[in-house]
Image (spheres, grey):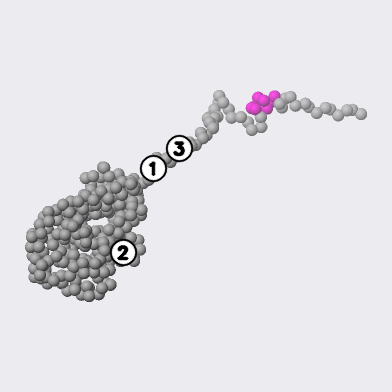
Amino acid sequence: MGPAGRSTRPAGPLGRLRTPRRPRIWFEILLIAVSYWVYSLIRNAVPEQKAQAMANADWIWEVEQRLGIAVEHGVNHAVNSVTWLIVGMNYYYATLHFVVTLGVLVWLYRRHPGRYAAARTVLFATTAVALVGYYLYPLAPPRLMNGQHFIDTVLVHQTWGSMASGDLKHMSNQYAAMPSMHIGWSLWCGLTIFALASVPWAKVLGLLYPALTLVVIVATANHFWLDAVGGLACLLFGYLVARLCYGALPQGLPQQVPDDRRKATAPPAAAPTPPAPEPARATEQPPSEEHPAPSPTGPGPRGATALTRASPEPAPAPES
């Protein structure tokens, strides 16, 4: 039972199966590794559909132009003119997507074990539904469009580590830009930090991280603005799944969980010692004719008379 007598068992359809407990580290490592491997396998197994992906990219670009938000080309060329900045963004795109996400998972595991499973469910559901988008809506990134003169900053600056460069591009689906999981994951990280961090500067960093990621994915010509909207939609789906499973969003669950192992090994509490019974007291009866009250000076009237009679009389004075 939690504070005020409330149970710590989560509500929701799976509440009965979700007794709060500290997650097992070996299980979490295995689960995350296998899940990402399966995600990459499915994502890269999506048929290439290059022609459809190019057509969809042209349509997205046309829609953004009509909406007046087609500024990706200008951002791409402006940032590319500053070598140190664009190289830094290339490495940002290739590395922080994984490093920050894993870092937030570790932080949740250590500092918020009661919320870890629900937050992890949000991330997993967000990633899983993105696979549906890759199948249903293949989309080429701006850097692969024909005739729009976007700069492929990874190739121009020969940045290491990107899945779009060198031999790695043959191992990765290059036409899976919608939705953007760089935005989906960075929003998950940022909102989690903002909701659960205890210091203001960490909350600010949590909000800045997805905002900076949005600039990076556009500057490197890896995504359109609307790809970010798709990533946000996937994240909302992830929160919905967690809400259905746990009865609350991660920040609404208790931070800590009871340590079942410590409870099992702790000695049972000693039962309170009952108070010693009071000694029995003789029942006092009021005086009556059959039982007269004892005299404070002697055993009773007859005893007093006997003592009076038995008292010796003084001897007479001798005659002279």
Identify the residue position indicated by label 2 in the image. 203
Label 1 vs label 3, nearer the camera: 1
**Mark closer to the chain start, 1 or 3:** 1
Task: Give the CA distance from mark 2 to mark 3.
Answer: 48 Å
- The residue nearer to you, when weighing 95 against 113, is 95
**Do labels 1 and 2 touch, CB within 8 Å?**
no
At 12% from the left and 58% from the top, the residue drawn is: 138
Span of residues in magenta:
299-306
Instruction: Tell me the crowding category of disc 3: few under 14, some 14 to 19, or many 20 or more residues within 10 angstroms, Cα based.
Output: few
- Whether the magenta-drawn stretch holds residue 291 is answered as no
Q: Secondary structure at mark 3?
A: loop
- Tally the marks: 3
Q: Secondary structure at mark 1?
A: helix
- In the image, taking residue 128 as reference, residue 307 lies left or right, namely right
Identify the residue position indicated by label 3 in the image. 271
Kind of residue at badge 3: Ala
Hey, which quadrant is residue 291 in on the image? top right
At 25% from the left and 48% from the top, the residue drawn is: 34
Task: Give the CA distance from mark 1 to mark 2.
Answer: 34 Å
Task: Give the CA distance from mark 1 to mark 3.
Answer: 22 Å
**Mark closer to the chain start, 1 or 2:** 2
Hey, which quadrant is residue 74 in on the image? bottom left
At 78% from the left and 27% from the top, the residue drawn is: 313
Q: What label sits on residue 261 in the rendered view?
A: 1
Kind of residue at badge 1: Arg
Hey, which quadrant is residue 200 in on the image? bottom left
Instruction: Tell me the crowding category of disc 2: few under 14, some 14 to 19, or many 20 or more residues within 10 angstroms, Cα based.
Output: some
